[in-house]
Amino acid sequence: MIAAALVTLLAAAPTSQAVRFLTRTPFPEAVAGNLNEHGLMSLATTPCASTANLSLPLAVKFQHVRPKGIIQSDDGFSGCQLKDGNWWSMMTMINHTRENICYDGQLVSKSTAKPFNVTGPLTERGNSRNLFIVRPEGKCNEQSPCPVIFYLHGHDEHVSTLVSVGGEKAEEESWEKAKGAGFMRYAHQADCGQTLGSVLVFPQLLEGESWAVDGPNLLQHFLVPVLKNHDQSGADGHWDMDRVAIMGYSEGSEGAIHAAKLYPAVFSLAIAAAPNTPTGVHLKIAESDVVPELVPRKLRLLIASFGEQDKIGSSKDGLDDLIADLDDSGVSKLTPLHVRLYLGAGHVHWDEMFNRWPALHSVVWEGNYERLDKLFQ
């Protein structure tokens, strides 16, 4: 199965891409137990007793857009395979929940956004944007630089005023908007604040901006310059530029998808939770539009999640648009896709991804990238 997949994918890729792909081929881990506890691309080893869930609307759509892809199920105790196929495109149905890894309690600290100077068309709305950076205590030195997480917020976390012009009142609004957002919330709690092993970068947009529509400009004139202009000897510590993840939820998921398409040599992991915005806006990017200077590739895996009962936008359209975007931009040729479908969950399911998936938490939050690296040895 794996050998056949390699032949097919290499034949479809240009020669230069094929060489890079050949040296970075992932091999998913076969798991007899709970898939949630193991790797980001764990494969079930046994067939499911029932295949009824293959008739769920999003499963039907996945089979239509990725007819050779694998579909499997994880009930919290063991995983099983609903449909055999090529692991390069994988769907895992999650029909259980578990306790939070980071206790969802009182915040014991806070952060203050700093202005970061932007360029290009972004300056039409202001010369800067708000940027939070949370650094793990006692880590990120020259001998052991820290991985980086860009965490892209949803629609409700936009701010009305920049901290560069609004002073203390703008700082208060910025923190009020940011403090409840997933990783920012975990970072300021007593338990998980101590286990953070990656640098958390939280860019904040103005009202009227959109990760979906403005994503390419925001990446080019805001997010990527954060990396390029980082002072490795500064207060925010040493960053590992080979281990930069970008993840977003709801509207922010669109920014993560843009990053995977446009900057595959900057970001090594892209995660998009609930990529079906109310407007259904997706900006199509052709393969010819991928930034040409950014080679070789670093992007190893793209993960997207959907809630079965999501009523904001259409999950089927979101999956359809996602696959089309990845195909049109050339990402599908060289980057595996893991789609996670949370059964019974709605739009706000990202804590299931970010705070109840031990394998992802280990890699992204704690900074244990060797769990991802071993797929590409």
Image: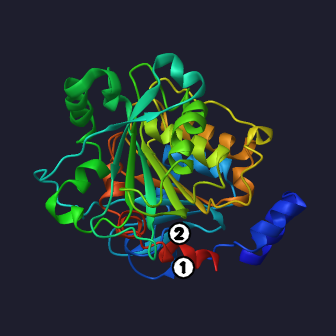
- Which quadrant is home to the N terminus? bottom right
View extreme (front): residue: 233
Viewer-proximal residue among 75 and 6: 6
- Image mark count: 2
Labels 1 and 2 touching (C-beta < 8 A): yes
**Where residue 319 appears, x then y in whole percent?**
56, 42
- The residue sitting at 34% across, 27% down in the picture is 164
- The residue sitting at 66% across, 64% down in the picture is 88
Residue 301 located left or right of residue 115: right
Residue 5 located left or right of residue 309: right
**Where residue 139 appears, x then y in whole percent?**
34, 70
**Where residue 183 appears, x then y in whole percent?**
31, 52
CA gap, disc 1 to disc 2? 7 Å
- The residue sitting at 73% across, 60% down in the picture is 296
Q: Which mark is residue 41?
A: 2
Q: Is residue 245 above or below residue 74?
A: above
Q: Residues within 10 Å of mark 1 (few under 14, many from 20)?
A: some
Q: Quadrant of residue 175?
A: top left
Pointer 1 residue: 29
- Which quadrant is home to the C terminus? bottom right
Label 1's element? loop
Q: Is residue 169 above or below residue 115?
A: above
Label 2's element? loop
Residue 202 located left or right of residue 119: left
Looking at the picture, which amino acid does disc 1 mark?
Glu
Viewer-proximal residue among 249 and 126: 126
